Amino acid sequence: MDIKKIRSLMPNINDMTYLNTGWSGPSPVYVVDAIKSRLELESFNGPTSPEILKSGQKIMSESKGLVSSLFKCRPEEVMLTDNTTDGINIILNGLPWKPGDEVVLCDLEHPSVLLPAYNLQSSRGVRLRMVTVNLNDKHNDIRQSFASVITGRTRLVMFSHIQYSTGLRMPVASIASMAHKVGARVLVDGAQGPGHIELDMNALGVDFYSSPGQKWLMGPDQTGALFIKHNLIPEIHPSRIGFGFSSNFNLEGRFEAVTNSIDKFSMSTTSAPLRAGYNAAVKMILNENMSEIETRNLELTRILEQGLSSINGVNIISPLGEAECSALTTFKIDRVDFSKATLKLWKNDKIVVRAIESQKGIRVSTAFFNTEDEIDKLIDAIKKLSDKG
């Protein structure tokens, strides 16, 4: 992997140390150029002229094909969404719930997982069962915790592939296997997945996987994709109805609902320019080899963890085990407010990281385009903060 070449396509990071890809990645020039090119094409040639409409449809079709390569699934199992939360809501609001059905989730989840579940509880009479996951738990501990909560009434198990707050990589396949044994479906929040780690929907054994385009893929905002296992598409009812819901209807109110195609979730006009940028982002990730990118991400994480471990007063709260870790590292500094420290790192050193309120810590994302020198710069800045208290 030619890091210098990749960084040459990212002039937006020349004047800063960007370590917050887990929130939103800095889009390279090929993503920005793809958006601009498509926007100009539509503006100068008429957005609804036949040629432009046809090329826009081609962009959407290409997007599904690219995601299927990234996810190792079928194109007909891919729905294009606005973001991760969009996909989560499509599944939660589309399943046929009955009062007393149980949803299992864990206490480390992002609000975009917790709040839709809370709403489901209040609006549909669904019972929520919370799994407690400790920060130092290994995969076997997590499996046992989920096993103790999943019951015969469990309808859905949902959790993040990688926990946003600590970078904990969850044992997805084994939890999915447990859920399926009692007939439950499995919904995974993949906000930290694509572009970060290698993915295979069949190997993971999930039923639904929702993901964004703006994080590790470094695509534009308001782009994402939802995987729905092909045999479960008829089970999910669209909660929002658009043109894809029926291709045969009349003015007397008669219609034939689409049931077996993922196109039934399609709404109205979507942004071809943004999707063109998303496609450019996914293409680059696929061309660079996702396995190599994941390896590079984790190599930088280990360098960061070694540096942080050498600083007195720094406590790493992210998992350090091989199976549990990811390229998200969260830590605390004794006697230093995490939120103020994040702002100082930017103000004093032009370093972009994230404050994690739920853990009262600082989170660093080590993406493949980052360098060892940037990690060293962060370590030096953390040392100064720790010394000053």
Image (spheres, rainbow, N blue to C red):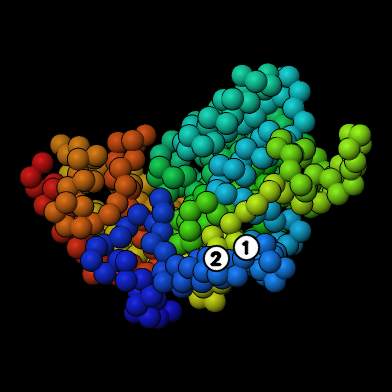
Query: CB atoms at circles 2 and 1 under 8 Å apart?
Result: yes
Q: Nearer the viewer, residue 207 or 259?
A: 259
Left or right for 95, reference 111: right
Q: Nearer the viewer, residue 184 or 13?
A: 13
Left or right for 6, reference 267: left
Say what amino acid the circle numbered 2 marks: Ser
Q: Which residue is drawn at 35% across and 54% down?
A: 20
The residue labelled by disc 2 is 43
Q: In this view, does 211 lie above or below 6?
A: above
For the question of whether residue 325 can be seen, the reply is yes
SS at circle 2: helix
Residue 47: assigned label: 1
Q: Which residue is drawn at 43% across and 35% down?
A: 134
For the question of whether residue 195 can be seen, the reply is no
Tell me where residue 107 appears, x and y as whole percent: 49, 32
Q: Is residue 388 above or below residue 20?
A: above
Tell me where residue 70 appears, x and y as whole percent: 61, 65
Q: In this view, does 311 lie above or below 17?
A: above
